[in-house]
């Protein structure tokens, strides 16, 4: 009786189940985190095209994502690019060097293996998009992927 | 007897302090929950866009139909031209054409192109799209979408497109 009334009884909750649950949640969020979204400007409203298929890169990792705002500004990883030609020239040299590691016979002026992914706002005038496409073509890029969505979100 | 006594003695319990680990785990959880932003499901249209070139190189002094050895004068032309003219203020497509023939609407373009590419004798393997500079990107994508759905005479999908900007259209 006297033992029951004593006040020095410690309440020690078993933290193991809560820790298990928290680690499961952490694992979930670590698996679904998408670092790729950093290269996408999510404020852009992409055009709606019925036949646009989800990205199938077929193992290809050499992608260069270009975000074009409706004012024509080019953004890469959230950073505005003013000297488009200079930037693309640098990227083409990087692509060329990377390609030569696998295909040594690739020469300057040949088609580069990098795919240019264009994410342009639906209201962008064509001349703004064409300015970027032409700059890419001038620097040897031929493969393009025009981003769109299947339906309005 | 002494040995038995030692065996019966319970070993001292080891109690790990999980509170610190739980704190850290909750911090990590909060970070991942706050930075979680599901990526939108986006599609894409893959294209090979070579720089636009002239549809046919005409030799100096050459006249149409003057080559008797060539029974098909159109054989040298392998590029189909689509013209897209948009309202300069709104950027919405106002008129369309395949070659010199007018197409009444974007919806009709698909049928017209199917007719062109269904002809087994058609020589086209690439398309040049002439677009007025103010045309909205989503309007242009409608045309690109229709073009990429076409199948060439050799059974391959049309993937070779070029854009030509028409100023002030």
Image: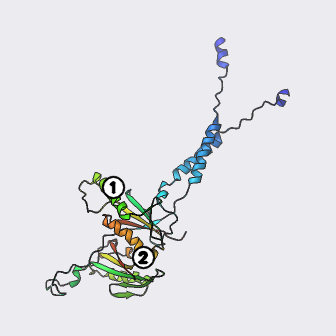
Per the image, label 2 sits on a secondary structure element best described as helix
Per the image, label 1 sits on a secondary structure element best described as helix
10 Å crowding of disc 2: few (<14), some (14-19), many (20+) = many
* Quadrant position of residue A90: bottom left
Residue A57, visible in the rendered structure = no
Relative horizontal placement of residue B128, taking residue B107 as reference (left or right): left
The N terminus of chain A lies in which quarter of the figure? top right
Relative horizontal placement of residue B80, taking residue A17 as reference (left or right): left
Look at the image and name its color scheme: rainbow
Whether A121 is drawn above or below A20: the answer is below
Picture residue at 23% right of the left edge, 79% below the top: B56
Q: Position of residue B137 (x, y in %)?
A: 44, 74
Provide the chain ID for the residue under circle 1: A
Q: Which residue is mark 2?
A: B140
Q: Which residue is mark 1?
A: A94
Please tell me which residue lies in front, A85 or B124: A85
Please tell me which residue lies in front, A139 or B114: A139
Please tell me which residue lies in front, B19 or B154: B19
Provide the chain ID for the residue under circle 2: B
Same chain? Circles 1 and 2: no
10 Å crowding of disc 1: few (<14), some (14-19), many (20+) = few
Relative horizontal placement of residue A11, taking residue B80 as reference (left or right): right
The C terminus of chain A lies in which quarter of the figure? bottom right
């Amino acid at each position: 009786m006297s033992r029951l009334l004593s006040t020095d009884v410690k309440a020690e909750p078993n933290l193991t189940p809560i820790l298990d649950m928290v680690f499961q949640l952490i694992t979930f969020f670590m698996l679904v985190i998408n670092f790729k979204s950093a290269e996408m400007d999510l404020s852009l409203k992409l055009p709606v095209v019925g036949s646009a298929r989800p990205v199938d890169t077929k193992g290809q990792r050499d992608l260069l994502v270009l975000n074009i705002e409706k004012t024509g500004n080019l953004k890469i990883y959230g950073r505005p690019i003013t000297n488009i030609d200079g930037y693309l020239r640098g990227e083409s040299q990087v692509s060329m060097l990377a390609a030569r590691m696998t295909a040594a016979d690739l020469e300057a002026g040949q088609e580069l293996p990098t795919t240019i992914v264009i994410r342009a706002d639906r209201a962008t005038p064509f001349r703004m998009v064409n300015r970027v496409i032409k700059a890419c073509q001038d620097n040897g890029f031929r493969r393009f992927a025009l981003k769109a969505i299947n339906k309005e979100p | 007897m002494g040995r038995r006594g030692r065996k019966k003695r319970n070993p001292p319990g080891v109690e790990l302090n999980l509170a610190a680990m739980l704190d850290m785990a909750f911090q990590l959880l909060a970070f991942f929950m706050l930075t979680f932003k599901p990526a939108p499901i986006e599609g894409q249209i893959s294209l090979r866009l070579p720089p636009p070139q002239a549809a046919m190189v005409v030799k100096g002094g050459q006249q149409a139909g003057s080559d008797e050895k060539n029974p098909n004068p159109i054989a040298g032309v392998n590029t189909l031209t689509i013209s897209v003219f948009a309202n300069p203020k709104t950027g919405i497509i106002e008129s369309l054409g395949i070659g010199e023939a007018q197409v009444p609407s974007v919806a009709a373009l698909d049928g017209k192109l199917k007719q062109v590419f269904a002809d087994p004798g058609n020589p086209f393997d690439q398309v040049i799209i002439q677009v007025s500079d103010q045309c909205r990107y989503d309007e242009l994508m409608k045309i690109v979408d229709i073009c990429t759905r076409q199948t060439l005479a050799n059974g391959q999908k049309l993937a070779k497109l070029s854009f030509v900007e028409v100023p002030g259209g």
